[in-house]
Image (cartoon, rainbow, N blue to C red):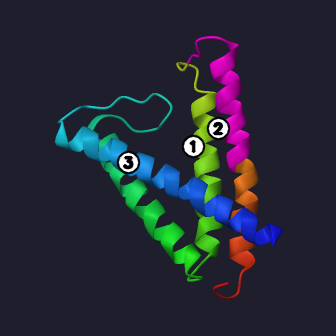
Amino acid sequence: MIAKLFRLLSYAFNLVIAVALLALGLVAKFSSLDLKLDMLPWSGHDLTNWLIGLGLLGLLIVGLAMYGVMPWLLLVWSVIIIGLWARAIYTPGWTFDGREPFNQTLQAFFGYVVSTIGAVSAARQRSVS
C-alpha cells in the first residue's frame, strides 16, 4: 500500500516536471524567445530544444512506467532530474530573495528526492498493479 502511494507520488511529481519543461520550451519556441536559464547547462535555441525534448521524454517515461513497461527508466529519469535540480540550486549566478524562497526550493527538492523512492518501487514492479 505504501509502495503504491510512493509510486503514485513519483508519477505525479515527474508528470508535473515533464509538463513544465515541455510548456516552457513550447512557449519559448512559439514566441521566438531566447531563454537564458543559468541553472541549466544549455542556452538560447539549444535550451529551447532541450526543454521540449526533455518534456516529451519525461512524459514518455512516466507513461511507460505507469503501464509497467521499462519502469526502471523512471528511476534513471528521477536521478537525472535530481542532478539538474541540485545543479540549479547551487549555481553561483542564481540567487534567492531571502531565506524563505531558498527554504521552499530546498523543501521541494527534498520532496522530489522522497518521491524518488516511488521510482525505486516502480523499478522493482514486475507488472501493472
Judge by depth and name the residue closer to the eye, 1 or 101: 1
Q: Quadrant of residue 66?
A: bottom right
Disc sitting over residue 30 in the figure: none
Judge by depth and name the residue closer to the eye, 34 or 122: 122
In what element is the residue under mark 2?
helix
Residue stretch rendered in magenta on the structure? 95-112
Residue 30, percent from left and from top: 18, 43
Q: Are marks 2 and 1 in contact (CB under 8 Å)?
A: yes
Disc 2 and disc 3: Cα gap in Å?
Answer: 17 Å
Which residue is pictured at 58% across the width and 80% down the height? 70
- What residue did someone put label 2 on? 86
The relative height of residue 69 versus residue 88 in the rendered view (above or below) is: below
- What residue did someone put label 3 on? 51
Q: Residues within 10 Å of mark 2 (few under 14, many from 20)?
A: some
- What amino acid type is highlighted by mark number 1? Leu
The relative height of residue 83 versus residue 57 in the rendered view (above or below) is: above
